[in-house]
Each structure stands twice: as C-alpha cells, then as structure tokens.
C-alpha cells in the first residue's frame, strides 16, 4: 500500500544561515543526505514522520522495544487517526516479514534495541521492505551516524534524539530527522502542526556538539568495550548485553561499532542495587565524563507489568549503562568494587 501523494508543499524553511539551518545541514552531511529537520523532541519527530508516511487505513510495523511515551502515542494517537500498529521483534527479520499485510506502509525500528542492546538487521529488513513497497524508518539514537548510517542500508528516513550522543553535554532537548528528499517536506509539515520550535541558541549548542561527535563516540565505544569485558568476568553478573561483530557478523558491512551503551544483569541474590547504581553514575556532575546508570524496570519500562517485562527480558536486576568519554577504567573499577560489596552483603544475609 503506497502513501497517497498530495500536492507538493513546502514547510517554512529555516533561515539560510541561522544556527537551526546550520545544525540541520551538519546532521544531514553526517548521514550522507542533502537536508534534515530539527524538531523539538523525539516523540514529536517520530509522530510527525509516521503520520506523514502513512494514510488513514494504513498499517505500521513497529519494534516491540519501544517504551513510553512513544509507545502510548503509537497505540493511542496514531490508531485514533486511523492507523493500525503491530508490534514485533524487529531484531528478527522473519518476524517483520510475517507481520506484513496488504495495507502495511511503514516499518519503524530502532537500529539498536534499548535496553537489551540487540542490533536490527537493517539490510535484510530493507530488502523485504523494498520488495513489498514499504518505507523503512529507523531510530538511530542509540548509535548515531558515527556508528551507523542507515540510509546506506536502505532506510528512507532516520530519526535521532539529541540525547545521549548528538548533544554531548546534555544541554538540548530536541531531535533530528533526515532522509530522502522527497519525504522531508511532508514530514516538516506534520511536525509543524504538532507545534513548538527549537531556539536558535539551543541549535548553536547542538551544532557545537556535532563537530566532536566522531571523536566522542570513538572514545565511548572503546570505553564501553572495556567496561563490558570487566563485567563479563565478575561472578555477580549473570549476563552482559553488548553486541559484537562475532555475534552479528553481518554488521561488519554497515557498522563502525556499537556505541557507548551496554546493559548487564546482576545475579538474583543481590537485591539492593543502590551501590551499583551509584558506582555507574560516576561523580554525578552530569557531564559526559561521568558514567550514567539506571534500572529500566524502574524508569523507561516501569509502565509495563512485571510479567510483560520478564517476557521481554527486562528484569529488576537489569542495569543500563552509558559510558562516558573518559574514565572507563575508573568506571569499571567502581562497578567491580560495588559488585563485590553487594555480593558479600548478599552472601552474609544468607548465612
């Protein structure tokens, strides 16, 4: 099912030499595209994109790894506007293919699921999307163009939240959209209807951060690998969720690496994870030099029932970790000490 073509429209353009236009151009260049849109928030960017690329009566296939508030938008607002949504595991290309209907128009997936850090086989999904006249939309937030450029895999639109990578200092709350030129005007029009705009000063800060993206992500990628290796060797850790090229050899053709995110599951004997969280949150100064840890079961996925979380593999023992630009060795040391202490306390409580 193709998207109904409407008369060409042109969204209000950013000032030719203003900070918004400059950051849009910089982001587009990072992805090898000609243009991009700066939108006030990832939910607005995604909602506007999916509305623009579908018609009433159309069907979307979306990743079941999406969490609120976006999950709620897809299940309520989009369905209220005549779209239907099927949630599947988009890290499994066969599951995506099976979900295709005659009225399907869009496949929407993150390039890396969060918090379980499973890469989506975008090349394979894109082949089947093209064969079925579908549009592949990729949320590339977890990797950024420093690690993956999904347009080169066959995606037609890319969405990225400015956190955690594009905005290296956590000063801007916005999102960027890029892709094939023919889709951007109607996406811009839909996003404009949702309201809001990004202030020029925020765009300036974001432009400054984009200039160092490749350098920052290279350091964070290497740091995440070191931390993951340390965690895998610890007896208090049941599993570390961090993709590798050995696990996903097909990614050698498309990925530079897998970013600065990882997650790990602590053994069930440890019930108090407060010390582990404190160790993962670095010195707490809020800069990219510090690590950042959280419990998805209590934050991003707290809206789900215990049963659904467990079925998805998101237990109360799962810790999601962002690795900072520097200090990965110190972060690994803090985590090992916290895990040692937590394990000793749990063993003491059992005796």
Image (cartoon, grey):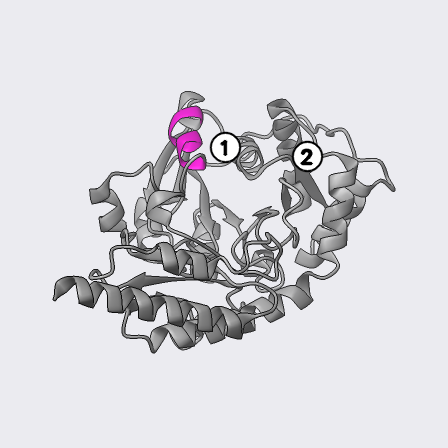
Question: Would you say the magenta stretch is mainly helix, strand or loop?
Answer: helix
Quick check: 80 above or below 223? above
Mark 1 = which residue?
A: 54
In the image, the segment drawn in magenta is: 70-77
Position of 298 compared to 324: left or right? left
Q: Residues within 10 Å of mark 1 (few under 14, many from 20)?
A: many
Indicate which disc, 1 or 2, sits on the residue closer to the N terminus: 1
Position of 228 compared to 272: left or right? right
Position of 163 compared to 13: left or right? left
Question: Residue 114 magenta-drawn?
Answer: no
Give the Cα distance between marks 1 and 2: 14 Å
Name the residue at 32% across, 46% down: 297
Position of 106 compared to 65: left or right? right
Question: Residue 73 magenta-drawn?
Answer: yes
Q: Residues within 10 Å of mark 2 (few under 14, many from 20)?
A: some
Quick check: 23 above or below 102? below
198 vs 45, nearest the viewer: 198
Image location (x, y in percent) of residue 19 = 81, 42
Whether residue 154 can be seen here:
yes
Name the residue at 64% across, 34% down: 40
294 vs 336, nearest the viewer: 336
SS at circle 1 = loop
| Quadrant of the snapshot with the C terminus | bottom left
Image location (x, y in percent) of residue 323 = 52, 63
The label number, if any, that marks residue 185 in the structure image: 2
Name the residue at 33% across, 36% down: 303
Image location (x, y in percent) of residue 290 = 57, 60
Number of marks in picture: 2
Name the residue at 37% across, 35% down: 85
The label number, if any, that marks residue 120 in the structure image: none
Whether residue 116 can be seen here:
no
């Amino acid at each position: 099912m193709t998207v109904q073509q409407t008369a060409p429209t042109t969204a209000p353009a950013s000032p030719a030499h203003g900070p918004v236009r400059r950051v849009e151009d910089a982001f587009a260049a990072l992805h090898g595209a000609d243009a991009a849109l700066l939108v006030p928030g990832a939910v607005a960017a995604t909602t506007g994109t999916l509305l623009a690329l579908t018609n009433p009566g159309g069907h979307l296939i979306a990743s079941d790894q999406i969490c609120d508030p976006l999950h709620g938008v897809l299940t309520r607002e989009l369905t209220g506007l005549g779209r239907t949504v099927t949630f599947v595991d988009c890290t499994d290309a066969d599951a995506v293919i099976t979900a295709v209907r005659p009225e399907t128009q869009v496949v929407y997936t993150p390039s890396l699921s969060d918090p379980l850090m499973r890469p989506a086989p975008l090349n394979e999904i894109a082949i089947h999307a093209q064969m079925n006249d579908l549009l592949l939309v990729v949320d590339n937030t977890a990797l950024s163009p420093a690690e993956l450029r999904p347009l080169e895999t066959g995606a037609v639109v890319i969405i990225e939240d400015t956190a955690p990578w594009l905005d290296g200092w956590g000063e801007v709350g916005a999102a960027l959209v890029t892709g094939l030129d023919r889709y951007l005007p109607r996406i811009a029009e839909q996003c404009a209807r949702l309201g809001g705009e990004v202030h020029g000063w925020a765009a300036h800060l974001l432009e400054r951060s984009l200039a160092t993206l490749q350098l920052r992500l290279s350091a964070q990628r290497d740091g995440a690998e070191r931390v993951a290796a340390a965690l895998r060797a610890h007896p208090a850790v049941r599993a570390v969720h961090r993709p590798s090229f050995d696990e996903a050899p097909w990614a050698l053709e498309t990925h530079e690496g897998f970013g600065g995110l990882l997650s790990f599951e602590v053994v069930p004997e440890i019930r108090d994870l407060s010390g582990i969280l404190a160790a993962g949150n670095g010195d707490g100064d809020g800069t990219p030099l510090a690590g950042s840890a959280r419990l998805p079961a209590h934050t991003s996925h707290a809206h789900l029932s215990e049963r659904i979380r467990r079925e998805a593999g998101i237990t109360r023992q799962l810790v999601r970790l962002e690795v900072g630009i520097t200090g990965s060795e110190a972060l690994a040391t803090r985590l090992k000490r916290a895990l040692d202490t937590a394990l000793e306390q749990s063993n003491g409580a059992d005796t």
